[in-house]
Amino acid sequence: MLILVTGGAGYIGSHTCKALAQAGFTPVVLDNFSTGHLWAVRWGEVITGDLADRELLVHVLKKYDIQAVVHFAASIEAGESMRRPDKYFRNNFINTLNLLEAMVETGVNRLIFSSTCAIYGEPQWLPLTENHPQNPVNPYGESKRAIEQALHWFSQAYGMQYAALRYFNAAGADLAGELGECHDPETHLIPRVLLALLAGTEIQIFGTDYDTPDGTAVRDFIHVADLAQAHVQALHYVQKNQDNLAVNLGTGRGYSVREVIAAVEQVTGQRVRVRETARRLGDAPMLVADVTLAQRELGWRCHHSDLHTIVQTAWKWHQGTYAKVQN
Ligand SMILES: NC(=O)c1ccc[n+]([C@@H]2O[C@H](COP(=O)([O-])OP(=O)(O)OC[C@H]3O[C@@H](n4cnc5c(N)ncnc54)[C@H](O)[C@@H]3O)[C@@H](O)[C@H]2O)c1
Ligand SMILES: O=c1ccn([C@@H]2O[C@H](COP(=O)(O)OP(=O)(O)O[C@H]3O[C@H](CO)[C@@H](O)[C@H](O)[C@H]3O)[C@@H](O)[C@H]2O)c(=O)[nH]1
């Protein structure tokens, strides 16, 4: 069964292609390589192209007899979206609309969508359940919320069947060391702490005055391999069921920025140099998932998402293959 994977050359997309191939699906990657990497596409064919090119999307969906789409391609930085909302609404919302239209035109009606906990905004209660009000605090989250709304109406009008997977913080690297996170510039906390160690520089903590136990922001980190596996199960879900799904993917356990830094020190045996600075615009204080629904509907469980395994696999990646692919 051929699956179109938009953004399959990126961090989560490449790990998911591996999981899809291992589960017997055949991924076909479409990526514009704006942040993705050719070395990360190792399972299935790759088409270099942009979601903005609707004709290309129609051509690819037809040519490969695509049965479902797993849609990762997007701009992903909440902080950048505060400065460049246009980029986020265009690349995330408008370009996804293109994809949805191409799917309607070609009769491909199953979609797994990379949504985010950023659609919730400031938590009114924790852990976040899927019915939590959606008040995004940045254009990135707003663009993803708009896509979820479009999906609802495409489902009503055209029978589009979808699973919106609301990831919390993806982290860690492939357990076999074949893949890992490689963004330039890197904005995510765990790789930034590891890269600071490797470069002998300091890491900034963005905000120490949050209303959290140690004053730093709290996130729910989920191992990218567990996340990848959830896509396999979501594909099975949309094959078997008629209804749509919007589920959180996290662990249910939050860690503060300081706790993450302590975990890095424990795994690496090295001291991290820290500088405390102001909050980063657009950051929520605490995001932790209630994962009951995903466990029940997808039969999905985390197996690698304890913080130690996350940091250990990321550290192995950054010390090993990461250095090679950078050169
Ligand atoms: N990383 C996280 O913690 C996280 C959390 C929640 C949701 N998400 C979502 O998961 C998805 C993947 O995130 P990631 O961390 O792997 O990001 P990434 O930047 O590593 O991957 C995105 C991929 O999409 C491609 N792409 C971007 N715009 C494109 C376009 N217009 N046409 C074709 N290809 C395009 C990029 O080249 C890249 O390969 C995104 O939709 C993101 O919003 C990520
Ligand atoms: O050098 C750094 C980098 C980050 N942080 C903090 O660490 C936390 C986590 O930041 P980051 O790793 O950048 O993740 P998020 O901003 O939570 O966003 C990620 O996780 C979201 C889900 O929570 C996704 O939707 C986004 O795509 C993805 O970028 C935040 O409080 C940051 O301010 C620091 O203190 N110092």
Image (spheres, rainbow, N blue to C red):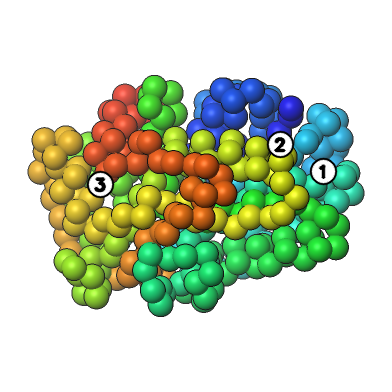
Q: Mark 1: few, some, or many residues within 10 Å (few <14, many ≥20)?
A: many
Where residue 202 sits: x, y (%)? 18, 51
Judge whether 28 appears above or below 109 on screen: above
Residue at the image point whose x is 77% and y is 66% from the top: 153
Q: Nearer the viewer, mark 1 or mark 2?
A: 1
Query: Are the residues at dot 2 and dot 3 in contact (C-beta closer than 8 Å)?
Result: no
x, y percent for residue 240: 71, 41
Residue pictured at 19% horizontal, 50% vertical? 261
Mark 1 and mark 3 in contact? Answer it, CB < 8 Å: no
Image spot of residue 210 (x, y percent): 25, 73
Residue ID for mark 2: 4
Determine whether 230 is above or below 260 in the image.
above
Q: Position of residue 309 (x, y in %)?
A: 28, 35
**Three-letter amino acid code of the residue under disc 3:** Val
Circle on res. 193:
3
Q: Is mark 3 within 8 Å of ligand 2?
A: yes
Could you tell whether 217 is left or right of 173 in the image?
A: left
Element at label 3? helix
Q: Nearer the viewer, residue 64 or 241?
A: 241
Three-letter residue code for mark 2: Leu
